[in-house]
Image (cartoon, helix red, strand yellow):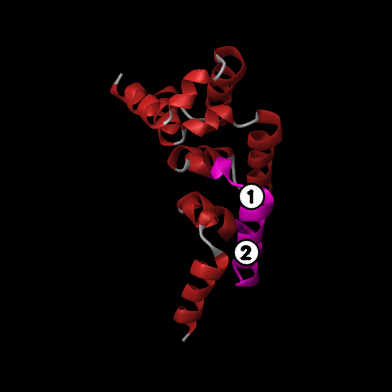
Amino acid sequence: DSQVAKTIRNFPQLMGYSLEENLKPRVQWLKELGVDDSQVANTITKYPQLMGCSLEENLKPMVQWLKGLGMDDSQVAKTIRNFPQLMGYSLEENLKPRVQWLKELGVDDSQVANTITKYPQLMGCSLEENLKPKVMTLRE
């Protein structure tokens, strides 16, 4: 109950979502991905906006893209459990440019998948203001 209260306190808009059209289908989708019952509530608490994301236009394409990088089902589930905010990122604006940049650095596909699984927050970091300057410093 404290988890539900925290979620509502942090994102009261959740209460405006449709139970049948938003909440139930997304909870079911999380479970089908391999997020178990005990972790679904944690995942929603971390990123309640997930319940408003379109399954067809956002969530499913994101998962397909992650799998296309070589992630298996358990890696996808782990990534979503640990950092569900990733599902709210833009493929075109966030993920694809950062993955391309990692590949240009010499990180191969399987390493990219492992990198996203271990540290999905990387996909939200600014290339110009954060990642590229750090690499430049490491190269000096």
Q: Depth check: 91 or 69 in front?
A: 91
User: Of the residues under marks 1 and 2, which one precedes in the sequence?
Assistant: 1
Q: Which residue is mark 1?
A: 70
Q: Residues within 10 Å of mark 2 (few under 14, many from 20)?
A: some
Question: Which residue bears the numbered disc 2?
Answer: 108
The amino acid beneath tag 1 is: Gly
* Residue at disc 2, secondary structure: loop
**Of residues 47 and 139, which is closer to you in this image?**
47
Residue 58 falls in which quadrant of the image?
A: top right
Q: CA distance from mark 1 to mark 2?
A: 10 Å
Quadrant the N terminus occupies:
top left
Categorize mark 1 by other alpha carbons within 10 Å: few (<14), some (14-19), many (20+): some
Check disc 1 and report its element: helix, strand or loop: loop
Side of 105 relative to 77 (left or right): right
Give above or below for 97 relative to 52: below
Which residue of the protein is positioned furthest toward the bottom in this rendering? Answer: 140
Is 8 one of the magenta-colored residues?
A: no
Asked if residue 140 is positioned above or below residue 21 in the image, the reply reads below
Read off the magenta span: 86-110
